[in-house]
């Protein structure tokens, strides 16, 4: 075991420095992620089915989407929102960077006779232009991106939407981290989320309070001594900071909520749900 390397990994990384690339597309990890998305009893990867249904109904009514309108579901995962939107007659395109999730979503749509266009693609490379009435980025997918990635994504969405199109997203606030805390500890398993074989997991959280950033880091040591570093970065927002960033990206904030199913905004919220429109 490389103790020197493990010691170096206890040092606070530069914000948004990467860990293992594309780990969500790893054959083993992506299977664990898909199972988590489809688990109806918790909110670990996706919100519970009843919450998703409530959100789809509220968004469809609030945005006044009509049958035939085009919706872009970014980070669509296994299609939990896309399938429900398509069932309401909307023309849905789902984009995700997990092959396993896209394969599952495509198969589900075929089995249920849903006309959904799914694409395995990094939405940071999206080049669609003037196609959609609304774009969705749900369950905090904006927060793990570095500043330059967020700027690129906003440009991509701005280009993809029709004039006056809606962009809907939700982001976490500092209250969320205060409520849930940082994970710090270790465990050893024969098989687990990160690896199919025996491995040791060293979890550590790093706070950057002056920038409202935090990092969940998992250092995984396999039986052969191989070390992998998995990093999940999160940018938290206040009402003012998310408004400023979206306005800089040429989106006007139309309304702000505690979630994306209609709970009025309060200052102590863990989440901010936003409905915005192209300027």
Image (cartoon, rainbow, N blue to C red):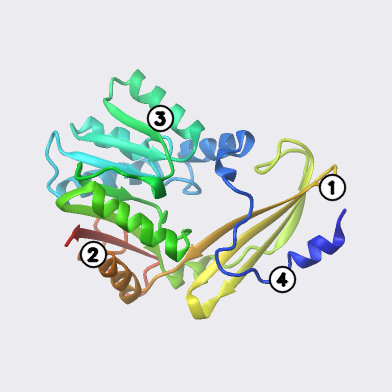
**Element under label 2?**
loop
Q: Which mark is residue 85?
A: none
N-terminal of the pair, mark 3 or mark 1, is: 3
Q: Residue at x 48, y 59 (%)?
A: 144
- 245 displayed left or right of 63: right
Question: Circle 3 sits on which residue?
Answer: 105
For the residues labelled 4 and 3, the Cα–Cα distance comes to: 39 Å
Between the C-alphas of marks 1 and 4, the distance is 20 Å
Instruction: Give whichever of discs 2 and 1 has the lower sequence position.
Output: 1
Q: CA distance from mark 2 to mark 3?
A: 32 Å
Is disc 3 surrounded by few (<14), some (14 to 19) or many (20+) residues within 10 Å?
many
Determine whether the residue tagged by mark 4 lies in a helix, strand or loop.
loop
In which quarter of the view is residue 109 placed? Answer: top left
Residue at image point 31% right, 32% down: 83
Q: Nearer the viewer, mark 3 or mark 1?
A: 1
Residue corresponding to mark 2? 250
> Distance between the Cα atoms at labels 2 and 1?
48 Å
Q: Position of residue 17 (x, y in %)?
A: 59, 63
Circle count? 4
Under tag 3, what secondary structure? Answer: helix
Q: Looking at the picture, tell me which residue is in the foreground, 262 or 140.
A: 140
Check contact, mark 2 vs mark 3: CB within 8 A.
Answer: no
From the viewer's perspective, is 64 left or right of 195?
left
**Residue that carries the numbered disc 4 in the rendered image:** 11
Residue designated by label 1: 225
- For the residue carrying disc 4, how many other residues have a C-alpha within 10 Å: few (<14), some (14-19), or many (20+)? few
Q: Mark 3 or mark 4, which is nearer the start of the sequence?
A: 4
Left or right placement of residue 116 versus residue 199 in this view: left
């Amino acid at each position: 075991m490389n103790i020197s390397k493990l010691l170096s990994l206890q040092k606070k990384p530069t914000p948004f420095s990467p860990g293992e690339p594309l780990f969500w597309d790893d054959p083993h990890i992506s299977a664990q992620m898909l199972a988590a998305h489809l688990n109806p009893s918790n909110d670990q990867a996706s919100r519970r089915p009843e919450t998703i249904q409530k959100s789809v109904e509220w968004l469809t009514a609030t945005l006044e989407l009509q049958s035939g309108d085009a919706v872009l579901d970014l980070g669509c995962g296994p299609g939990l929102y896309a399938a429900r939107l398509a069932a309401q007659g909307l023309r849905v395109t789902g984009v995700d960077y997990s092959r396993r999730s896209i394969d599952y979503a495509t198969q589900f749509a075929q089995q249920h006779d849903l006309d959904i266009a799914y694409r395995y693609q990094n939405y940071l490379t999206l080049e669609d232009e003037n196609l959609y009435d609304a774009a969705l980025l749900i369950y905090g997918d904006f927060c793990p991106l570095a500043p330059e990635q967020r700027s690129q994504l906003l440009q991509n969405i701005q280009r993809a939407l029709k004039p006056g199109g809606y962009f809907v997203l939700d982001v976490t606030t500092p209250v969320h981290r205060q409520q849930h805390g940082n994970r710090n500890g270790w465990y050893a398993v024969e098989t687990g989320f990160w690896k199919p074989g025996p491995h040791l997991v060293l979890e550590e959280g790093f706070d950057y309070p002056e920038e409202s950033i935090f990092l969940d880091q998992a250092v995984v040591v396999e039986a052969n001594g191989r070390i992998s570093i998995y990093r999940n970065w999160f940018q938290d927002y206040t009402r003012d900071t998310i408004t400023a960033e979206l306005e800089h990206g040429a989106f006007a904030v139309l309304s702000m909520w505690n979630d994306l199913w209609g709970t009025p905004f309060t200052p102590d919220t863990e989440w901010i749900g936003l409905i915005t429109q192209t300027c």
